[in-house]
Amino acid sequence: MKTEKSSLKAALISQGSGSSKMQAEAMKKYFGEVDMLQLKDIEVRLGKEAGVLYDGKPLKKYDCVYLKGSFRYANLLRSIASMLEGKVPYMPLAATSFTITHNKLLTHLVLQQHKIAMPKTYISATVEAAKDILQKVNYPIVMKFPEGTQGKGVMFADSVSSATSMLDALEALNQPFIIQEYVETDGCDIRALVVGDKVAAAMKRKAQKDDKRANIHVGGRGAYIELDRVARRLAVETAKALNADICGVDILETPLGPVVIEANVSPGIQGLSEVSKVDIADEMARFMFKKTEEIVGISSEIKKMETMKNILTEVGTKDSEEIITPLDFRGERILLPELVTKMTKFEDDKDYSIKASKGKLLIKEFKI
C-alpha cells in the first residue's frame, strides 16, 4: 500500500460488475483519484471533432485507463482504446486485444502465429466443406461460435451424425463456427490470471455433472492451484501475444503438455478471489500503478530533456541568459551545471577572474 497520496489519476471503464467494483476499490489504495465509468455512457466521435465523451462531455485526462467489457462491446472497447492511445500514458490493454480476444477465431490465429500450443482447430468456408472435415477428425469434437464468453456458444459432438445435425442447425442460423478436437480432462480446465510478466493466481475449474464446460458462470467449481513452470510460461506468452498486460488464459492439461483454449482480457476476478491465496484485485491495482508511475516518470524526464535542449539552442543565439538551478556541492566545492559551461564557452586552458561575496558570484575571462 502506498504511504503517501499519489497525484496520478485513473479510470476504470466497465459495465459495473462486481469484479469491476472490487478492482476500483483496490485501485483507490494506490492512485490519488479513481473514477469508475459506465461503458454504456461512453461515446466515441470521429471526424473533425474526434474524441471520447462521457455523459456527453469530453473524457477527463487520466494517467491510467483500464477498459473492460463483454464481447458485445468489443468494437466499442477497441474504438475507445484506439482514441486514447498516445493520449493516456498507460493502458494495460492494446486496442487490438479487444477485438482479437473476443473472437475465438482471431485468437487462435494469433496463437498459431506465435506458435503457442492449442488443440487441433479447423476452420472452413462453407458448411459443405465442414462436413468433409467431420469425416476426417477423431471424436468427440467441440464446435464453437467465434464470439461468446463464459462457456456460451460451445457445443460437443461425439459422432459424425450428431456433428452433422449441429452443422445443419448452424447453417440455418447463418453463423460462422470453429471445429476443434476435444481434449478429455474429466470436465476440468485451468484459469490463469496473467498480470504483467507473471501469473498472479490460477484455479482449476471442475464442470457440473453432465456438463463439459468448467466455467464458473455456468456452474463450474474452482479450487486454487499452483501452476508448473511450463503452464506459467504458456499463460504469459499468450497474454504477450495478445498485447495484454492483464489477461485471463484458459488452459487444458493434456498428456503432451498444457494447451490454450481461450483468452479473456476482461476476466472476472470474484471466483478466483474466493479460492486464491492472493489478493487478486490488489495485485492488479499495484501493477497498474507502478506501470503508470514508471511511464509518467519517463515522460516527465523526456520533457525536461527537450526543454533543456531548447534552452541550449536559444543560448547559442544570445549574448547572455539567466537560468534558475540548484548548485551541486562537492564537499567545499561548487560544481556548476553543464549548461553554464555551454553558455559561457569557458575553456580549461585560460585564466579567469572571480569576484565572490555572500550570495553572489561573478566569473569572467581574465584578459591582460
Image (cartoon, helix red, strand yellow):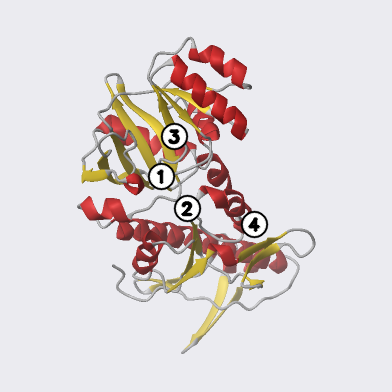
Question: Is label 2 in a helix, a strand or a loop?
Answer: loop
Residue 31 can be seen, yes or no: yes
Q: Name the mark nearer the viewer: 4 or 1.
A: 1
Query: Disc 2 and disc 3: Cα gap in Å?
Result: 29 Å
Quadrant in the rendering for residue 263: top left
78 or 6, nearer to the observer: 78
Q: Which mark is residue 83?
A: 4
Amino acid type at mark 3: Val
Is 125 situated above or below 97?
Answer: above
Q: Contact (CB < 8 A) between labels 1 and 3?
A: no
- Judge the density around disc 4: few (<14), some (14-19), many (≥20) Cα neighbours within 10 Å: some
Query: Disc 4 and disc 1: Cα gap in Å?
Result: 28 Å
Q: Which residue is mark 1?
A: 150
Q: Please name the residue shown 62% across and 62% down the image.
A: 306
Q: Please name the residue shown 69% across and 75% down the image.
A: 320
Q: Please name the residue shown 41% across and 16% down the image.
A: 159
Q: Which residue is mark 2?
A: 92
Q: Which mark is residue 154?
A: 3
Query: Disc 1 and disc 2: Cα gap in Å?
Result: 22 Å
1 or 2: tag closer to the N-terminus: 2
Q: Tell which residue pokes out farthest to the right in this image.
A: 48
Q: Contact (CB < 8 A) between labels 4 and 1?
A: no
Q: Name the mark nearer the viewer: 1 or 2.
A: 1
4 or 1: tag closer to the N-terminus: 4
Amino acid type at mark 4: Met
Q: Tell which residue pokes out farthest to the bottom in this image.
A: 358
Percent of width and height locating residue 134: 49, 15
Percent of width and height locating residue 160: 45, 15
Question: Is label 4 in a helix, a strand or a loop?
Answer: helix
Query: Disc 2 and disc 4: Cα gap in Å?
Result: 15 Å
Question: Is label 3 in a helix, a strand or a loop?
Answer: strand
Residue 350 can be seen, yes or no: no
